[in-house]
Image (tube, rainbow, N blue to C red):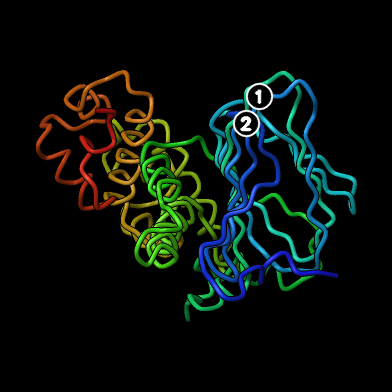
Amino acid sequence: MDSFFFNITDTSYKVSYLYKEKKNYIKRVDISNGIVFFDVYIYSKQTKIFKLKNLDRMVIITVTKQGSFFIHDNINKKIYNLKKNSINILNSSRQDLSISLKESEKTEIFVLFIADFILKRHLSSNQNEVINFLYNNIQGDVSCDFIDTKPIDALSLYIINKILDSKSEDTMASIRCEHNILEFMIHRFNLLDILDDKLKDDEIRISKSAKNILLSSYVKPPSIKVLAHLCATNETKLKKVFKKVYNTTIYAYIQKLRLEKANLLLKDQILNIGEISKEVGYKHQGHFSKLFFQYYAVYPKDLLKK
């Protein structure tokens, strides 16, 4: 059975079309042997289906900008509906998959396929890292495992546009594009929480309770004293357990939630930067922009449409 990867022989950044008619297309781009993406823009009166049937271990990241599409797991007879405005992560170690695009619906999607040996290059000594979790998962017998879904954010669109704007004739196109794809992977994987399976039950209970409270109150969060009371523990234990479980402080986690929400608001293109900074709990726009740059390495103004 042919491999889905290893489509490049004497060149890099190989572009091929699975379908093309006027402005409609399904484009496959091989960045290197191990990294492939599909760029799809289509409005068709007929359902379009393309198949993946291999024995490759891979992580799949899908981005649905417009419309929706389905991934059919023909081994376990499951269907995943990947809806508009979502970024999803799936794992697979043996594929008999079909991707179907619905008829009479404008569909714009980006699908990234990453081989396990690409992940292996970046494994950490910390087994709780997301990349380790994903790599280890696809070493088993997995036809299609749905891992996570998140709404599309402004930074993701910004990075994807850089990926799509790459051209095969650009100098070092493959390296440039792979750099952007790694940037996208880092950002998307950073949104996943992987808990250590050696944690005690009370550590998980306290940390999850605190996290759920902060998720709904990060704009005006409670004090540590109040948060500890709400979690039925003391301040010292709360801070220690939260750091152990999520590998960050409560203050840093609040900042993370604020900046992630700002990233989503920037994508909507409704509020200006000053309004967004206040919406997520920052009084001063300059301070907000500085923190956003420190976290994402890009200023919020760069994510707004020109």
Furthest residue toward bottom: 125
Separation (CA) of disc 2 from disc 1: 7 Å
Residue 291 position within the rendered picture, expressed as x and y whole percent measured from the top left? 19, 46
Secondary structure of residue under mark 1 = strand
Which of the two discs, 2 and 1, sits closer to the camera?
2
What residue is at 36 percent from the left and 34 percent from the top?
A: 261
Residue 54 position within the rendered picture, expressed as x and y whole percent measured from the top left? 80, 64
What residue is at 51 percent from the left and 53 percent from the top?
A: 192
The local crowd at label 1, few if under 14, some if 14 to 19, many if 20 or more residues have their Cα within 10 Å, is many
Q: Which residue is mark 2?
A: 24
Q: Amino acid at mark 1?
A: Tyr
Secondary structure of residue under mark 2 = strand
Name the one closer to the observer, 190 or 31.
31
Please tell me whether residue 125 is drawn above or below residue 247 in the rendered image: below
Name the one closer to the observer, 11 or 80.
11
Say whether marks 2 and 1 touch (CB < 8 Å): yes
Quadrant into which the N terminus falls: bottom right
What residue is at 53 percent from the left and 32 percent from the top?
A: 65
Q: Is residue 137 left or right of residue 112?
A: right
Residue 254 position within the rendered picture, expressed as x and y whole percent measured from the top left? 31, 43
Q: Which residue is mark 1?
A: 43
Residue 283 position within the rendered picture, expressed as x and y whole percent measured from the top left? 13, 29
